[in-house]
Image (tube, helix red, strand yellow):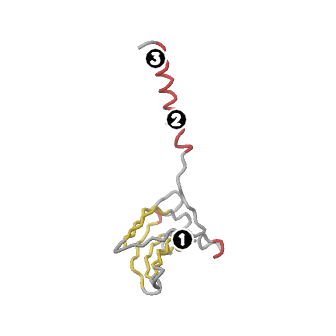
């Protein structure tokens, strides 16, 4: 290998490691931050997933996402799923408990609680992410 090729290889390796070192500093993730019960109803954030492109689900569907509960004292509704052709509505809600824990509740709105998942306090807070998957069959 010639001296020129060796120097070129060394320069390439240096730049490669510099890029690898600084890359995490410039990469952003895609996150939606919502205002919740600490804000007035008019200022609360919502996102209508199928507002302009309505989907039809046959037999089953599933949804999965990561959830970060930054301040467990002021969190509330996480997700609402409504059938536009009937009064059936499901909601996923975070509720803070007094014993330094919380829970996610899946409700059939106005009818019953379907599921309750306790969450330890160590799972709650900024930069702590909870994987959530819901399957409707």
Q: Secondary structure at mark 1?
A: loop
Determine the CA span between mark 1 and mark 2.
Answer: 41 Å
Q: Nearer the viewer, residue 34 or 102?
A: 34
Q: Position of residue 47 (x, y in %)?
A: 55, 68
46 with respect to 12 (left or right): right
Q: Secondary structure at mark 3?
A: helix
Q: Which residue is mark 3?
A: 5
Q: Position of residue 119 (x, y in %)?
A: 44, 68
For the point 48% across and 71% down, the residue is 54
Determine the CA span between mark 2 and mark 3.
Answer: 21 Å
Q: In which quadrant of the rendered image does the C terminus lie?
A: bottom left
Determine the CA span between mark 3 and mark 1.
Answer: 58 Å
Q: Residue furthest top?
A: 2
Sequence-wise first label, 2 or 3? 3
Q: Which residue is mark 1?
A: 51
Mark 3 in CB contact with mark 1 (< 8 angstroms):
no
Q: Secondary structure at mark 2?
A: helix
For the point 49% across and 36% down, the residue is 20
Q: Is residue 28 above or below residue 113?
A: above
What label does residue 19 carry, if any? Answer: 2
Sequence-wise first label, 1 or 2? 2
Q: Position of residue 112 (x, y in %)?
A: 42, 85
């Amino acid at each position: 290998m010639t001296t020129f090729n060796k120097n070129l290889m060394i320069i390439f390796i240096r730049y490669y490691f510099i890029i690898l070192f600084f890359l995490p500093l410039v990469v952003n993730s895609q996150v939606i931050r919502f205002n919740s019960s600490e804000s007035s109803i008019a200022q609360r954030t919502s996102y209508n997933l199928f507002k302009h492109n309505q989907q039809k689900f046959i037999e089953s569907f599933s949804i999965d996402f990561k959830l970060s509960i930054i301040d467990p004292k002021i969190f509330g509704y996480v997700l609402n799923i409504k059938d536009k052709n009937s009064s059936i509505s499901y909601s996923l809600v975070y509720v803070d408990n007094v014993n330094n824990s919380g829970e996610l509740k899946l409700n059939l709105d106005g009818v019953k609680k379907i599921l309750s998942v306790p969450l330890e306090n160590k799972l709650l807070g900024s930069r702590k992410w909870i994987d959530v998957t819901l399957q409707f069959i």
